[in-house]
Image (cartoon, helix red, strand yellow):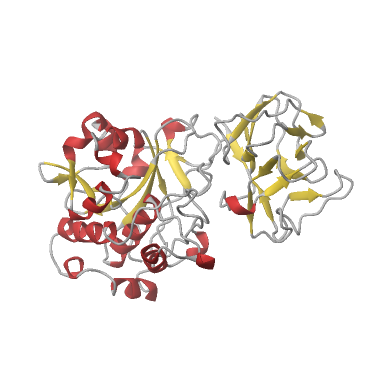
C-alpha cells in the first residue's frame, strides 16, 4: 500500500514552463504526514540540448545528488528520486530545483497554470526572496510545479466514476450538424459507429508535434478540432498538433452526441513511457461491453463480426492484425509517411496497447474546463485524470488512480442523465 501526494492535475503547457538558473529557482511545498520509510519523489524537468549543467535539487534544505542530462531525453519527462528515511517530516516539506547556468539555457520545470494561491514559488535572486505569482519564464502565469511524492504509508483513493456528457448541453446538438447522414440514420450501432469513424479519419491529416509539423496544441473542443486540423491553422495562425489524440476525442464526443456511451482510451507501449496510442471505446448494449475503435486509422476490431474490447485485444495482441478491419478512411493514412508504418504487420499496434488506461471524464463538451491542456504535446503522460490498471501501479507510481478489471468493464452508469 502507498499514497501519492500532489497539488496539481498535471495539465501543464510545454511552452510555458519554469526556467531554472542559479538565480531563478523553483520551490514546491507539499504538506505530508509523518513517515519513517523511504519515499519517492517525482518531477518533470526538461534539459537544454546544448547545456551540460546538471539539475540540482534539495529536500528540506539537504541537497541531493544532481540529475545529469541524458542526450536521449531532451524533452519533458518524469524523473524519480528515492528519498531516504528521515528526510521528510510531518507538515510542510520544501523541494527546490535550480542549475548552475546564469542564462535560461540549462533546465526547465513543468508547471500547470491557473491557480489562485499555489504552493509553488520562484525567485530571481538565488532564494533571498520568493513569490508564487508572476511565474513561468515570461513572468505571466501563476501555477503549480509538477512535483509529487509517494509515501509507503497510506492508500490511494478509489478511482472516480466515469463522467459523461450532459445530453441537454447545446454543444452536442451543434456538433451533430456536422455528422454524415449514415451516422444519423437509425440502424445498428456498429454501422453508425463505423460511419463516425470513417468520417473522422477522413477529416484531416494526422499531424504530429515537431519541426515543420504541428506547433500548437488544440483544445479538446470537437468542432474546433475539425476546423483547425482541416485548415492546418489554429491559435495565432500556427499549425496545430492533430495526432491520434484528437481523432479519439472527436469520436468519443460524437458517439455521445448520438446517445452512444463512449470514452477516451490512453495507452503506453512500455513502463513509464509515452510512446503509445490514443483511441476510444463505445459501449455496446448488444454485447454488454466496451468496444475499442481507432478512428485515426478507421480501424475496428472484430472476431466473427463481434466487436472486441481492450481486454480481449490485449489477450490477443500478437495477432491483433488478424482482427483489425479497416474502413475507407484508412487509405489517406496509408499514404502518409508519418503513419504508414502502422499498417505493416500489426506489431506497432500490438505494442501500443501493452498498458491501458482511460480518461475518466467524458464530458468533453459539457465541461471543457476539465479537459487536458496539451495532452501528447508534452511527451510524457502527466494528468491525474488518467486511470491506469491496478497491475500497473508500479509502472505509473506518479499517478493517483488505479482500477481493477471491474472498473474498466463496468457499464456506463449515469449516462444520459
Image quadrant where residue 256 sits? bottom left
Q: Is residue 156 left or right of residue 125?
A: left
Report whether residue 292 is seen: no
Q: Nearer the viewer, residue 158 or 143?
A: 143
Q: Nearer the viewer, residue 62 or 26?
A: 26
Name the residue furthest left. Answer: 304
Question: Taking 150 as reference, is 6 above or below it?
Answer: below
Residue 218 drawn at (x, y percent):
47, 60
Identify the residue at image location x=57%, y=32%.
Answer: 2
Give the number of callouts.
0
Question: Taking 257 as reference, is 61 above or below it?
Answer: above
Residue 110 drawn at (x, y percent):
63, 46
Q: Is residue 406 left or right of residue 291?
A: right
Report whether residue 261 is seen: yes
Name the residue furthest right. Answer: 128
Q: Quadrant of the C terminus?
A: bottom left
Q: Is residue 8 left or right of residue 62?
A: left
Q: Nearer the viewer, residue 231 or 67?
A: 231
Identify the residue at image location x=75%, y=59%.
Answer: 134
Question: Taking 184 as reference, is 32 above or below it?
Answer: above
Q: Quadrant of the N terminus?
A: top right
Residue 61 drawn at (x, y percent):
82, 33
Residue 352 drawn at (x, y percent):
35, 37
Amino acid at each position: 500500500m502507498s499514497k501519492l501526494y500532489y497539488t496539481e492535475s498535471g495539465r501543464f503547457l510545454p511552452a510555458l514552463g519554469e526556467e531554472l538558473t542559479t538565480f531563478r529557482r523553483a520551490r514546491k511545498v507539499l504538506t505530508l504526514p509523518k513517515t519513517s520509510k523511504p519515499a519517492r519523489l517525482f518531477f518533470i524537468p526538461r534539459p537544454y540540448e546544448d547545456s551540460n549543467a546538471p539539475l540540482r535539487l534539495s529536500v528540506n534544505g539537504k541537497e541531493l545528488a544532481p540529475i545529469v542530462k541524458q542526450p536521449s531525453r531532451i524533452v519533458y519527462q518524469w524523473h524519480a528520486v528515492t528519498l531516504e528515511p528521515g528526510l521528510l517530516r510531518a507538515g510542510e516539506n520544501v523541494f527546490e530545483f535550480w542549475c548552475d547556468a546564469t542564462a535560461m539555457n540549462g533546465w526547465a520545470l513543468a508547471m500547470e497554470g491557473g491557480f489562485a494561491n499555489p504552493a509553488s514559488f520562484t525567485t530571481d535572486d538565488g532564494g533571498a526572496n520568493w513569490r508564487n505569482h508572476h511565474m513561468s519564464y515570461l513572468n505571466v502565469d501563476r501555477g503549480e510545479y509538477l512535483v509529487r511524492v509517494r509515501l509507503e504509508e497510506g492508500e490511494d483513493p478509489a478511482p472516480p466514476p466515469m463522467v459523461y456528457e450532459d445530453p441537454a448541453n447545446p454543444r452536442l446538438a451543434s456538433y451533430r450538424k456536422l455528422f454524415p447522414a449514415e451516422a444519423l440514420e437509425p440502424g445498428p450501432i456498429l454501422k453508425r459507429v463505423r460511419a463516425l469513424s470513417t468520417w473522422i479519419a477522413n477529416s484531416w491529416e494526422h499531424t504530429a508535434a515537431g519541426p515543420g509539423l504541428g506547433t500548437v496544441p488544440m483544445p479538446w473542443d470537437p468542432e474546433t478540432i475539425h476546423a483547425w486540423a482541416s485548415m492546418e491553422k489554429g491559435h495565432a495562425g500556427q499549425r496545430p498538433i492533430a495526432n491520434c489524440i484528437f481523432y479519439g476525442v472527436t469520436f468519443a464526443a460524437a458517439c455521445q452526441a448520438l446517445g452512444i456511451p463512449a470514452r477516451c482510451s490512453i495507452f503506453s507501449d512500455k513502463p513509464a513511457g509515452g510512446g503509445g496510442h490514443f483511441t476510444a471505446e463505445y459501449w455496446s448494449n448488444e454485447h454488454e461491453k466496451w468496444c475499442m475503435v481507432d478512428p485515426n486509422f478507421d480501424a475496428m476490431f472484430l472476431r466473427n463480426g463481434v466487436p472486441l474490447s481492450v481486454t480481449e485485444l490485449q489477450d490477443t495482441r500478437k495477432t491483433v492484425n488478424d482482427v483489425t478491419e479497416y474502413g475507407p478512411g484508412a487509405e489517406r493514412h496509408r499514404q502518409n509517411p508519418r503513419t504508414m508504418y502502422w499498417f505493416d504487420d500489426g506489431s506497432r499496434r500490438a505494442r501500443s496497447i501493452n498498458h491501458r488506461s482511460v480518461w475518466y471524464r467524458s464530458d468533453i463538451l459539457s465541461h471543457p474546463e476539465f479537459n487536458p491542456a496539451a495532452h501528447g504535446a508534452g511527451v510524457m503522460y502527466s494528468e491525474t485524470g488518467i486511470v491506469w490498471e491496478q497491475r500497473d501501479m508500479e509502472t505509473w507510481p506518479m499517478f493517483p488512480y488505479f482500477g481493477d478489471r471491474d472498473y474498466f468493464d463496468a457499464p456506463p452508469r449515469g449516462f444520459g442523465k
